[in-house]
Amino acid sequence: MRVLLVKTSSMGDIVHALPVVADIHAAYPEARIDWLVEEAYAPLVQAHPGVERVIPLALRRWRKHLRQAETRQQWADLVRSLRVHAFDAVIDLQGLVKSAVIARLARGPHIGLSWASSREALAPLFYDRRMKTPLRRTEAAVQRYRELAAWALDYTPSGPPRFGLKVQAQRPVWLPAAASRPFAVLLSATAKPRKLWAEDCWTQLAGWLWTRGIASVFAWGNAAELERAERLSASVNGAYPSDAVDRPARPAPEAFGLDVWMQVLAAADLVVGVDTGLLYLGAAVGTPAVAIYSGSSPHSVEFQSAGPWRSLGDAGRPPAVQDVLAAVEDVLAPRWREASSLPASVPADCGMGLGESP
């Protein structure tokens, strides 16, 4: 059996779809699985040994260079890659018109969600078979993906989701005392302001971690996020004086690519973040993780981690910092939990991020 999975973006959604691979192999051990994905996220899918072939798609880049010969050649290569094999099933987990149209280039029966269930109502026009689900388009992403693949291939998924990523943990050389000092990756940034958590909450969290012997690294991906990471780090370091090298908090030294972040997250002792792709990636590689929801709902994912996991808050209801600290204690190994206690000075609530209101 040969199957093509179509899930092109985004990072978090691709992580949510990964358990489909283990489900298919459990039902059909000899299955050969290919995956169509945007080139920026190809390293993520390539880290799954159950995927035989990753087919990169570069729509975002191609749109900017439509007339270039290189673009035409890469498009031709994509078409050949999709048509070199006939598939027993082409399963569109993306549910968008553009993904459904491109997937039609592949040979085989095309399967997706029904008119009422698909993310875009016109996408089912391009399917040969359509599954109707009682779940709404914004509910339980992991479950929806697993159910669609199971329906397409006639099996019943069982057990918790298995993400299956094989990532080599690589402790950052830019962290002092890297061999001994535990570190947490803090994901305070997001492209959607409504998902932010207040900056004073982040500084309290990072300061509290430092008192437990854990340094913090603030991730970032663009200039605005770097400015935020630098501001947060400076605030923490000002409140907890230390030597110039071994500091309580620091921004990541650069905007790392996905391949580097996978290694860093796998090596981290903890990841705490807002609703963003790197949070789910860290959890999927088994790192203890705490999710902070303030502008989105955890019910849209119903995420189950490969390691210790807690999710707090909801749309319009950011969690109190004290609850986040308690969740951190809960997910960390017993040796950390035994050494920790909640400081009485922590406020009950610290609001939304950067002046955002529910």
Image (cartoon, rainbow, N blue to C red):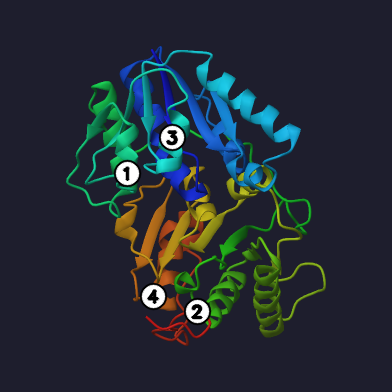
Q: Residue at horizontal 47%, vertical 81%?
A: 343
Amino acid type at circle 3 is: Val
Q: Quadrant of residue 111?
A: top left
Q: Earlier in the sequence, mark 1 or mark 2?
A: 1
* Nearest to viewer (mark 2 / mark 3): 3
Q: Quadrant of residue 72?
A: top right
Amino acid type at circle 2 is: Gly
Relative image position of residue 220 (x, y in whole percent): 65, 63
Res. 108 in view? yes
Taking the image as shown, residue 215 lies to the left or right of residue 357, namely right
* Nearest to viewer (mark 4 / mark 1): 1
Q: Earlier in the sequence, mark 4 or mark 3?
A: 3
57 or 251: nearer the eye? 57
Q: Residue at horizontal 43%, vertical 18%?
A: 107
* Nearest to viewer (mark 1 / mark 2): 1
Q: Is residue 204 above or below residue 180?
A: below
Q: Is residue 102 above or below residue 139?
A: above
Disc 3 packing (10 Å; few <14; some 14–19; many ≥20): some
Circles 4 and 2: CB atoms closer than 8 Å: yes
| Residue 101 circle label | 3
Relative image position of residue 28 (x, y in whole percent): 34, 16
Q: According to the image, label 4 marks what residue?
A: 318
Q: Is residue 174 above or below residue 326?
A: above
Amino acid type at circle 4 is: Pro
Taking the image as shown, residue 173 lies to the left or right of residue 130, namely right
Q: Earlier in the sequence, mark 4 or mark 1?
A: 1
Amino acid type at circle 1 is: Leu
Q: According to the image, label 1 marks what residue?
A: 122
Q: Looking at this rendering, what residue extends furthest in the left direction?
A: 134
